[in-house]
Image: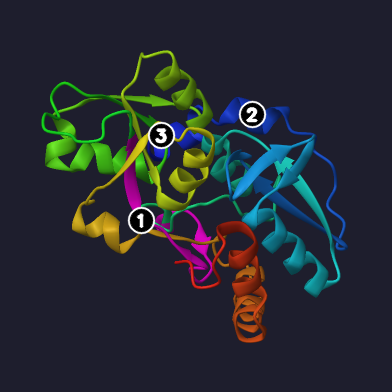
Amino acid sequence: MKILLSYWLWSGLLSVCLLACQPHSSNELYIGVSADYPPFEYQQGGQLVGFDIDLGQALGDAMGRSVVWREMSFSSLIPALQSKQIDIIISSLTATALRKHHVAFSRVYFTSRPVLLSKQAEISQWTDLRLGVQLGSTMEQIAKQQVYLQQASVVALPSNNQILEEMKANRLDGIILEQAQADEFLKHYPMFHVHLIDGPTDLQADMGYAMAFRLNDPLREQVDQLLDQFEQIGTIQALKQKWFGRHDAL
C-alpha cells in the first residue's frame, strides 16, 4: 500500500547504511520487504509469510535463484534499491507517478482500494477524527490531498501495527489503509468498522501494487514475463485464494 523523495533519501539513509554490504551472487535474488503489512508480508512464528512472500519465492524458483529477504522500514526500501543493497522491492508498493521518476516498476500484480478502518460504525463529522496513516505510503498522500480527509487530524507513523496500538489505546480513531489488509485486521479486531473512501483521481489511478527495480534494469523485463506466465498458469490466482480466500481478489 506505501514523504516523499526527500524522506526516502535522508530518513532511510541510516537503515541502508546498517545493511551488511555483502557481495551479490548471481545465484541469489535479494528482495527488500517491510514485513508489517498482513496479509501481504508479515512475521509469523519467526518466519516471513504472506502473499508477497510467496510470490517472491515463486519468482526465485522460476529463475533458479535463491531468494534472500532483507527486512527494513518501508521508507528505507527505495534508498536500499538505489544503493544496490537489494535487487527488487516486493512490499505492497504502489506504482505512483512520483516513484516512477526514481525506480522502474513491473506490471501491476494486485489492484488495491483505500478504506478507513475505524471505531465508528457511522461517520458524520470528519473534523473530530484522529486518523493514522503509514509514513511514506500512498495512504498518506491520499489523506493530504482528499478534501474531506484534510478536515481530520492525521498522524503518520512508521507502521500500521503501531497505528492499531494507538487505536486500541484510544489515542487514534481510525486508520487509512488498503482493503485487503483492513479485512485481515477485522479478523482480530471485529469491533472496528470499514468505510470505503475515495482517493484523488490521480492517486486512484495509481492504486496498484507492483515490484520495483532500479531504472533501466533488465531484471524488470524478465520479472514481467514471469508474472504473465504466473497469471496464465494460475499461480497468482492460487495465491489470492490462499491469502484472501478468493481467486478473483483485485
Q: Which residue lies furthest to the bottom in this view?
A: 232
Instruction: Please tell me which of labels 1 and 3 falls first in the chain.
Output: 3
Along the line of sight, which residue is nearer the eye, 7 or 165?
165
* In this rendering, the label closer to the viewer, 1 or 3: 1
- Residue 166 picture location, percent across and down: 43, 18
Q: In this view, does 194 lie above or below 109?
A: above
Q: Where is residue 173 in the image (x, y as percent from the top left)?
A: 31, 24
Using the rendered view, name the quadrant where residue 128 is placed.
top left
Cα distance in 3D space between marks 1 and 3: 26 Å
Q: How far apart are marks 2 and 3 (CA)?
A: 15 Å
Secondary structure type for disc 3: helix
Decide if residue 213 is in sight here. Answer: no
Q: Which amino acid does label 3 sit on?
A: Ser
| Residue displayed at 67% across by 75% down | 235
Image disc number at residue 6: 3
Asked if the magenta segment contains residue 189, the reply would be no
Residue range corresponding to the magenta coloring: 100-117
Q: Which of marks 2 and 1 is in front?
A: 1
User: Who is closer to the viewer here, 16 or 55?
Assistant: 55
Lateral position of residue 88 relative to residue 26, left or right: left
* Distance Cα–Cα, label 2 vs label 1: 29 Å
Residue 137 drawn at (x, y percent) = 41, 41
* Secondary structure of the residue carrying numbered label 2: helix
Q: Residue 113 carries which label?
A: 1
Q: Cβ–Cβ below 8 Å for labels 1 and 3?
A: no
Q: Which colour scheme is used?
A: rainbow
Q: Name the residue under label 2.
A: 15
Q: How many labels does the image show?
A: 3
Q: Is mark 1 on a helix, strand or loop?
A: loop
The answer to the question of whether label 2 and label 3 lie on touching residues, with beta carbons closer than 8 A, is no
